[in-house]
Structures are given as structure tokens and as C-alpha cells.
């Protein structure tokens, strides 16, 4: 049985999936283990190869049945899979700088490998679950985690761009000054930009900007007693439980997303908007509230655009691996391997 593998390589974990030529996924849920990316390419690529054997054993197929592999990693990297000369965001070992990870993995596995950045891979999976295979629709996905990434699927294909930076949605500037309740704030992204989406809509934004802004306005809040990094991680859970300050922080993030999505609506006129990442690893009630706040943060839409759906990214933990596998399956079909 011919199958294609998807490998989602993060800074801390590797997740695998397998899909057959009928687009049936052979592994349900997570198949992951801690990543050794901090130990450099040699150790990490060997670990990927070892883990792929574990994944095929789990799915009950032979390693030789894998005809192609789809890989996704955090950026920045070229569309072909060459990491930035400064290294990838989460791969701190010096040997990753400028490393061609797609080619390195193909050599290690002896199989053709396709490459996407992790947010683009998740966007492809989200699009597929909504519109199915061979769709011609357009979707815009935003993935909110420690940082902010995303992906654009145009006419059924991932927009990668000349240098692989297509879908770097977190670094799109937004008119944040129009968000109510944050007068005088100056949100700075780790990339150096002032007022891009990531500077307000990410876990890093909560730690660097939003908690320092709101804590003085909520005197005596328990989070003021905690280490700022740990306090930032606690905001989502407290917001889900109805904490007023934490919900206000998430309202600001939702309205920032609303401003961003408005820009995407007027650029691509998409068929759907999708939100994923840790921001919505919450109760369904909170998810519903957050999506409603995104709409509340969008400027007035044209009558034809008012009903544009906003979805929660399905299978959030495995979305990257599944999207990477779908990209590899498409390329395998084009080359006659599947």
C-alpha cells in the first residue's frame, strides 16, 4: 500500500501522520515525541528517520510503502526549505543557519520530500477539511500561538511567495490605534515592527505588551504576583473562566484579528477565514465568544461580505503534519509516485 508521510518538526516536538492515495489518514490523534532540534541537523534528522519507522509501525504499514514525505517547520525559510542564514526561530543550534532541511531530509530518508512552513501547512489542512480536495476556493488562516503565523490558500494552492515568506501574516501592519481600550499603547513585535498583528495577537504580545498595560488598571490582580512569563501563560485559562482582565486582553487580540481579517477580505475576497493555534484551545463557549469578538472588531463590511464564515482550525495539534502530508501527496501524484 503506497502512503505519504507528514512530518511536523517544531522546536520542542515532532508529530507524524500517514495518508494513503485515497486521502485516508492512517494515524488518529498525536504520534509525537520530543524534538532534538537544539542538538543540530545531524542528530535531528536521524531522530526524524527513527520516528518515521515508529509511525509506520503504529499504522501497520512498511517503511518501504512510504513513497514521499511532507515536511513542515517554523520559518523563516525559503519556499524550497533552506533555513534563514540567521537560523530558524526555534532552531538555535549554529549549524541550522542556512541549512537546506528539505534536501537534508531527502538524503537521510532516501525519499522525495516536499516543504512548507508550519503555519502554511496548518492552513492547507484547515482549507482541506472545509472545502475538500481539488477545491478552487480561497481561504485565509491565522494561527495564534507563541508568535503569529498563517497561510493563504488561493485557488486550492498554498501561496508561498518568491522567498517563501508568503503567509507571514503575523507581520502585517494593522491600524491598532482604532482598538478601544488601549490608548497610548505601543506594541512592538520581536521582529522590530510596531503595530503588526503579532505585536498584539500572540502569547509573546500578552507577556511583553498587554499584561504590562492592563495589570496597573486592575490593581491587586493575582497575576501581578507571578513571574511575567508564567502569568502570560495563565491568561487564556483565566479568560476562559471569565476573569474580567484576561477577557479584556483576549478582546484586544480578537479585535486585532478583526482588523487584520478586514484587510484580507479586501485583498482576496476569500470564501472563508480560519483561526487556529493555542488561542482557541479553550471551551466551545469561549471559542464562540472569541469569534464573535473578531467580527465585532472588523470594520463595516459590504453587504455581500457580511456572511463570510469564520472557522476554528480543526485538529489543531495535528494540523501541520496533516497539511504537510497533503502537500506531499499532491506532488507525489503529479510525479506519478502515488
Image (cartoon, rainbow, N blue to C red):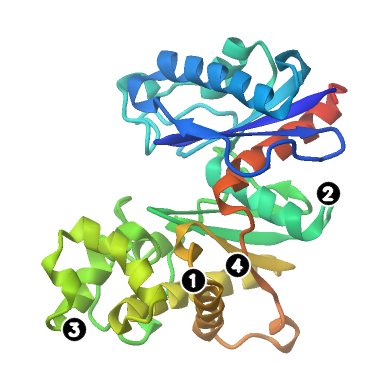
Q: Which mark identifies residue 133?
A: 2
Horizontal side of residue 237 vs 121, given as left or right: left
In 3D space, how far apart are the residues under numbered discs 4 and 3 (Cα atoms)? 34 Å
For disc 3, the neighbor class at 10 Å (few under 14, some 14 to 19, many from 20) is: few
Q: Are marks 4 and 3 in contact (CB under 8 Å)?
A: no
- Kind of element beneath mark 2: loop
Q: Regarding mark 1 in the picture, which secondary structure is present there?
A: helix
Quadrant containing the N terminus in the rendered view: top right
For the point 82% across and 40% down, which residue is it? 23
Q: In this rendering, is residue 287 above or below 158?
A: below
Residue 310 visible within the image: yes
Q: Which label sits on residue 218? A: 3
How far apart marks 1 and 4 lie (CA) works out to 10 Å
Q: Which quarter of the picture shows residue 249? A: bottom left
Q: Check disc 4 and report the residue beneath it.
A: 264
Q: Quadrant of residue 180?
A: bottom left
Q: Earlier in the sequence, mark 2 or mark 3?
A: 2
Mark 4 and mark 2: Cα distance apart in space:
23 Å
For image coordinates 85% across by 30% down, the residue present is 333
Q: Nearer the viewer, mark 2 or mark 1?
A: 2
Q: According to the image, label 1 marks what residue?
A: 257
Report, in whole angstroms, how far the alpha carbon at label 2 lies from the one at label 1: 27 Å
Near mark 1 (Cα within 10 A), the count class, few <14, some 14-19 or many ≥20, is many
Task: Point out the tag, 4 or 3, that comes first from the N-terminus.
Answer: 3
- Residue 262 placement (x, y as % from top left): 57, 75
- Mark toward the start of the polypeptide (2 vs 1): 2
Residue 176, visible in the rendered structure: no
Q: Which mark's residue is nearer the viewer, 4 or 2? A: 2
Q: Residue at x 62, y 13 (%)?
A: 109
Tell me the SS state at disc 4: helix
Which quadrant is the C terminus positioned in? top right
Amino acid at each position: 500500500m503506497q502512503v505519504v508521510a507528514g512530518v511536523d518538526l517544531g522546536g520542542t516536538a515532532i508529530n507524524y501522520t500517514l495518508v494513503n492515495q485515497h486521502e485516508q489518514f492512517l494515524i488518529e490523534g498525536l504520534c509525537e515525541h520530543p524534538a532534538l532540534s537544539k542538538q543540530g541537523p545531524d542528530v535531528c534528522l536521524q531522530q526524524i528517520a527513527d520516528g518515521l519507522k515508529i509511525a509506520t509501525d503504529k499504522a501497520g504499514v512498511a517503511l518501504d510503502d512510504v513513497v514521499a514525505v511532507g515536511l513542515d517547520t517554523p520559518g523563516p525559510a525559503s519556499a524550497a526549505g533552506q533555513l534563514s542564514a540567521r537560523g530558524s526561530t526555534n532552531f538555535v543550534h549554529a549549524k541550522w543557519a542556512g541549512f537546506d532541511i528539505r534536501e537534508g531530509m531527502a538524503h537521510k530518508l532516501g525519499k522525495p520530500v516536499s516543504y512548507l512552513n508550519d503555519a502554511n501547512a496548518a492552513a492547507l489542512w484547515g482549507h482541506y477539511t472545509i472545502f475538500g480536495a481539488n477545491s478552487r476556493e480561497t481561504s485565509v488562516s491565522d494561527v495564534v500561538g507563541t508568535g503569529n503565523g498563517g497561510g493563504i490558500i488561493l485557488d486550492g494552492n498554498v501561496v508561498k511567495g518568491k522567498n517563501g515568506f508568503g503567509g507571514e501574516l503575523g507581520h502585517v501592519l494593522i491600524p491598532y490605534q482604532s482598538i478601544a481600550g488601549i490608548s497610548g499603547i505601543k506594541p512592538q513585535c520581536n521582529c522590530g515592527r510596531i503595530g503588526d498583528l503579532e505585536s498584539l495577537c500572540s502569547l509573546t504580545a500578552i507577556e511583553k505588551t498587554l499584561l504590562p498595560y492592563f495589570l496597573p488598571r486592575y490593581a491587586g490582580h493575582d497575576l501581578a504576583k507571578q513571574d511575567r512569563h508564567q502569568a502570560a501563560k495563565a491568561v487564556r485559562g483565566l479568560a476562559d473562566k471569565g476573569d474580567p482582565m484576561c477577557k479584556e486582553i483576549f478582546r484586544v487580540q480578537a479585535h486585532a484579528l478583526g482588523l487584520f481579517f478586514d484587510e484580507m477580505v479586501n485583498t482576496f475576497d476569500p470564501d472563508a477565514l480560519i483561526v487556529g493555534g493555542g488561542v482557541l484551545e479553550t471551551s466551545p463557549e469561549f471559542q464562540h465568544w472569541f469569534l464573535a469578538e473578531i467580527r465585532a472588531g472588523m470594520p463595516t463590511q459590504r453587504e455581500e461580505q457580511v456572511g463570510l464564515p469564520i472557522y476554528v482550525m480543526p485538529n489543531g495539534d495535528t494540523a501541520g503534519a496533516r497539511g504537510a502530508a497533503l502537500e506531499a501527496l499532491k506532488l507525489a501524484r503529479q510525479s506519478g509516485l502515488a
